[in-house]
Image: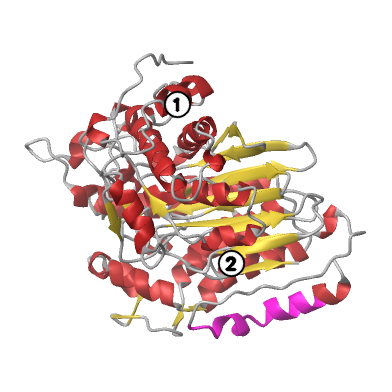
Amino acid sequence: MPQFLEHSLRWIFSARSILKLSTVYFFVIIFCSLSHQTQASDSCAIATAHPEATAAGCEVLLDGGNAFDAAIAVTAALGVVEPYSSGLGGGGFYLLHVADSGRDVFVDAREIAPERASEGLYLNAEGLGVPLRSREGPLAAAIPGIPAALQHLSTVYAKLPLEAVLQPAITLARDGFSVDPRYVRAVGWVEKRIRKFKLSERIFFNKGEPFKLGEVLKQPDLAQTLETMAKDIDSFYRGSIAHEMVNHVVSSGGNWTLDDLKNYQVKERAPVIINFNGAKIVTAPLPSSGGLVMAQVFNILEDLSYYSHDHTVRPHLMVEAMRRGYNDRARFMGDPDFSDAPLKQLMSLEYARKRGRSISFDAATDSDSLPTVFDLTLDGEETTHFSIVDDEGNRVAATLSINGPFGSGMVAGNTGILLNNHMDDFSIGIGKGNAYELVGNRANGIEPRKRPLSSMSPTFVGSEKGDLAIGTPGGSRIISMVMLAILEYLDPINVDPEAIVSLARYHHQYLPDRVQVEPDSFDDAWISQLRSKGHDVQVYRRKWGNMQAIHCDTKQIRCSVLNDPRGRAGVVF
């Protein structure tokens, strides 16, 4: 990296008050113009949902860390400045490209159900689900995976000591950060939930009142927890932090045990590989449903020659492919350690052709009468995303979550850790929808130590246009948003890769049987075209997602940060 730029960046990141002045959305984007003689090792970039998290990652890179060190720093910082989206009390998926071996690996840090969890805890006497039990309070919280992921990344892939890498997050928690519009909006959505828990209200409100734009939010308990973890990361699962969390959860009516924490492990899994339109797509395997849904949708679209059709036909074909992909999500998918999904068949071109045969170019399929392929056999602000590329060619795409805004709403004692509500991602009452209206089957039913099915889909795309690392928050719509961005990116007539993050979005998830559309995104003719084919099109009140992507050209000479205009900040240097 040029020395003048390094000095400039160090000045910017030490003067953190500059980043705290914002009371509106903005991008922190720093470009270093690189000559064609520059090697790939001179390009690195960070795209996150918050400028303070971006700054934390940059500090670590400037101190000699690699993309995996930066991923640790960004994860910890996002948990401080976006407590409504992710944190130590949640889980996530990390898609890694390890440059020296050329290997792609998926790190599964999804939460697991406690040993004492059972479906009966979330049902009433009539056998019907009681939504609040899985969405707020102690029974809503699954065993977190993020701290184990930080330890795994640090031990296996990173360069720097964990204590140094966590320092930016510790500083943010101790000294505070300026509240932005997204924080204010998230609190507004779940204010009643937060106020039910006095510890949470004390942290996330300002003397009993919601924080206003620009006011500084400090989290001293979380700072102390991070300092303890920096010295002994094991304390989260086996030490003082574990004891404090379990005591608080149990005294509040939950069912955690110390063994639940002690037995938690991250898992490395082989990612899903999809070949589509000459591109290689590397994405998330189960327990994320993203890879399998994408494989089916892209295979169907390939078989239907998607790019040969004009823009009046493509949305209909995409909706019909989504309908079928999400139908199989509901039928087959769950934690691969507990249930066998017919992976080879679901990802095969033959199966896609069979699914595609039932698609009419002129009319929508009714989800309730969706044809089933029977010859399958079994074989052996709620979320956040960031993407990182370093000067060695390592890449990270990570999607993290505590599920709903501010998760369960409950902070675990004096740890400052806000707990997730990912128990709601299990299928509770088979065939019934969760908070995102997703339905499921026994494959995603509650069992002790099981991971709930997820939609989080960190993804890499390699093509003649270059390399892309991409992902977004957005609940059940994550998969659709990532697929739409990839379709736009790979479109032969698209010459502006950076437009993919601002693309207008639509979504169909099998049930409820409707096409969901962002507001102010599509004209009346577009909507009428879908309705004329029998689609129920509903325009929603607010936009979705906060996509964070990095695009590097084919020679890895120049990398561009692609920030969703719905969100905030990234850096390229």
The residue under label 2 is which amino acid type? Answer: Ala
As drawn, is 119 to the left or to the right of 184?
Answer: left
Q: Which label's residue is closer to the chain start, 1 or 2?
A: 2
Which one is nearer the viewer's eye here, 257 or 65?
A: 65
Magenta: main secondary structure equals helix
Q: Secondary structure at mark 1?
A: loop
Question: Disc 1 designates what residue?
Answer: 337
Looking at the image, which is closer to me, 437 or 267?
437
| Screen quadrant of the C terminus | bottom right
Vertical order, 206 against 476 (above or below): below
Front position in the image: 503 or 89: 503
16 versus 106 height, above or below: below
Q: Give residue 354's position: percent from left, percent from top.
A: 42, 22
- State which region is magenta: 7-23
Left or right: 131 as drawn, with respect to 531: left
Figure check: 286 above or below 146: above
Number of other residues with Cα within 10 Å of mark 2, as a class: few under 14, some 14 to 19, many 20 or more: many
Identify which residue is drawn at 24% across, 38% down: 428
- Per the image, the residue denoted by label 2 is 53
Total of numbered circles in the picture? 2
Q: Are marks 1 and 2 in contact (CB under 8 Å)?
A: no
Q: What residue sits 70% from the left and 48% below the top?
A: 467
Q: Is 44 included in the stretch rendered in magenta? A: no
